[in-house]
Image (tube, rainbow, N blue to C red):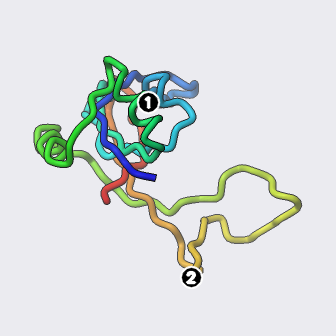
């Protein structure tokens, strides 16, 4: 599948216990996308969408989802405040899989190495939200 980049509006939804999450436009729900960068404040961001041409076209038709060229992505990244990035080992999802038990709390790649995700910390009001980003 091909990829496309979009600039999208975001909102912040409290999840309880002092935590919050970013909410993307409804048209993206259930689709295969990753954040490239989120503007400080959590009001907008750039995503990388990996879906069929038909799905990408449907997203592009939305008024609040602006399709971007690679050059526009780079220009926007330069105009956004410098993100606060950190690396974090990916942990296993809390999904029970047919009695599979492991002592390793982290996800491993095919070679047995721990998978590392790059995380951007976004401040929105008094919330600090960790967002996995795709730097590639």
Q: Residues within 10 Å of mark 2 (few under 14, many from 20)?
A: few
> As displayed, is residue 70 above or below residue 90?
above
Residue assigned mark 2: 111
**Extreme residue toward the front, this view:** 54
Q: Earlier in the sequence, mark 1 or mark 2?
A: 1
Q: Residue at x 14, y 47 (%)?
A: 71
User: Do tag 1 and tag 2 residues touch (Cβ < 8 Å)?
Assistant: no
- On the image, the x and y values in percent for residue 23 come to 46, 26
The residue sitting at 83% across, 65% down in the picture is 100
Query: Does the image show residue 14?
Result: yes
What residue occupies the far top of the structure in this picture?
A: 63
Residue 76 point in image, percent of width and height = 16, 39
Location of the C terminus by quadrant is bottom left
**Percent coordinates x, y for residue 37 in the rendering:** 29, 43
Residue 22, numbered circle: 1
Q: Where, by quadrant of the figure, is residue 67 drawn?
A: top left
Figure quadrant of residue 117: bottom left
Q: Residue at x 11, y 38 (%)?
A: 79
Element at badge 1? Answer: strand
| 131 vs 8, nearest the viewer | 8
Residue 33 in the figure: left or right of residue 46: right
On the image, the x and y values in percent for residue 21 come to 48, 31
In space, the residues marked 1 and 2 are separated at their CA atoms by: 33 Å
């Amino acid at each position: 599948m091909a990829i496309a980049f979009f600039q999208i509006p975001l909102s912040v939804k409290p999840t309880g216990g002092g935590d919050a999450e970013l909410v993307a436009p409804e048209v993206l729900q259930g689709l295969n996308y990753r954040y490239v960068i989120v503007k400080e404040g959590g009001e907008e961001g750039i995503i990388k969408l990996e879906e069929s041409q038909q799905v990408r076209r449907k997203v592009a038709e939305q008024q609040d989802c602006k399709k971007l060229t690679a050059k526009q992505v780079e220009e926007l990244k330069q105009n956004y405040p410098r993100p606060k990035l950190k690396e974090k080992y990916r942990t296993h999802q809390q999904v029970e899989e047919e009695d599979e038990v492991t002592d390793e709390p982290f996800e491993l790649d095919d070679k047995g190495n721990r998978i590392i995700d790059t995380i951007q910390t976004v401040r929105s009001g008094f919330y600090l939200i960790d967002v996995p980003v795709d730097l590639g």
